[in-house]
Amino acid sequence: MKAIQFHEAGGPEVLRYDEVPMPEIGAGEVLVRVRAVGINPPDWYLREGMKVMPPELRPALDFPLTPGTDVSGVVEAIAPGVREFAVGDEVFGMLRFPGFDGRAYAEYVAAPVSDLARKPAGIDHVQAAGAPMAVLTAWQYLVDLGHDVPNPFTGTVHRPVPITAGTTVLVNGAAGGVGHFAVQLAKWKGAHVIAVASGRHEQFLRKLGADQFVDYTTTRAEDVTSDVDVVIDAVGGPDSARFLNVLKRGGTMLPVFFAEYDPEVTAGLGVTVSTAQVRSSGAQLAEIGRLFDAGKLQVGVDSTYPLSEAAAAHTRAAQGHIQGKIVLTVIP
């Protein structure tokens, strides 16, 4: 079969479209003929050699590597004893995360049954592949963490804040993968949603349910918002702490990406900072799938590329300003 591999860390140019052996399935697994693959930040973190992590925490990489976790496709074969799926079932999932053994950038992939759910009938394979990591991140932050595993970077277990009618949720980076799902899930729970993104995304986000929109290219969100209950920051970085000031006392900051907060500052403001590391969950995706089928959730697709053009897709990702998700397609 064909798969994307890289034999050394580097830029998008290290991604190669190689001939590789078909994967073998083990106990509790199915073989999925891949129709589409979602691209996520951990894919390029891995490709770059995990430079995003402190040197002492970087895992040893055993090349060649095939990146990717998010797939949608059709079950081709099942291991003995598997009862959850049958050959021909359409499925989607995030494979073996946290970890770097998803190997999703391929024509076929061995997938743990526990990481898969039936693909919602109301969305196609491209949309389904764009969903898993991003929607599970938003779900585990805002709705149900679904496990008691501490975040390895903080040593604490995240507890989602109850979101009900009357809750105000601000989403920074609202047009991206996690952000556009956070907007929709907060709205589904009844929240008043403030979306922060560049102006070209305003209509996209209002259609997804945003009640207010802040164009960060012309207006600082901290100058025009206050008394917010929850901030989910899908951008992170050194500027993330500025959103602490829009929270009311008792409010919660949820940084999706790496960001540092002064404990004395947060204590003085009376706010909590809580983080989680998304984990694979076929059971949660099955529950989320019902929202897709009910029309409560949509997948924004920024762009698609053939599997063979994964390098071009990673180049697009590096340009930023993504609306929804970038997806690789695999021709049947």
Image (tube, rainbow, N blue to C red):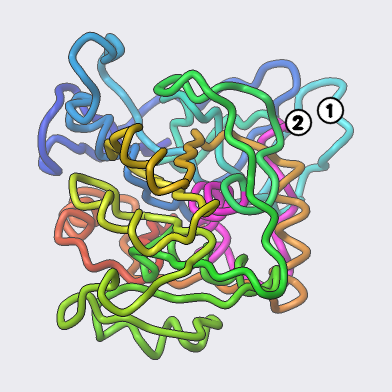
Compared to 43, does 331 lie above or below? below
Residue marked by disc 2:
78
Residue marked by disc 1:
82
* Residue 35 shows up from this direction: no
Q: Specify the quadrant that holds the N terminus.
A: top left
In-image side of 6 versus 207 (left or right):
left
- Answer yes or no: do the residues labelled 1 and 2 have beta carbons within 8 Å? yes
Front-most of residues 38 and 209: 209
C-alpha distance separating marks 1 and 2:
6 Å
Please tell me which residue is depicted at 60% across the width and 67% down the height of the picture. 186
Residue 330 in the image: x percent, y percent?
44, 55
In-image side of 320 versus 203 (left or right):
left
Front-most of residues 17 and 252: 252
Please tell me which residue is depicted at 62% across the width and 69% down the height of the picture. 167
* Residue 79 shows up from this direction: yes
Amino acid at the residue labelled 1: Val
The main secondary structure of the magenta stretch is: helix
Residue 307 in the image: x percent, y percent?
34, 51
Compared to 225, does 43 lie above or below? above
Magenta span: 113-139
Q: Secondary structure at mark 2?
A: strand
Please tell me which residue is depicted at 37% across the width and 50% down the height of the picture. 39
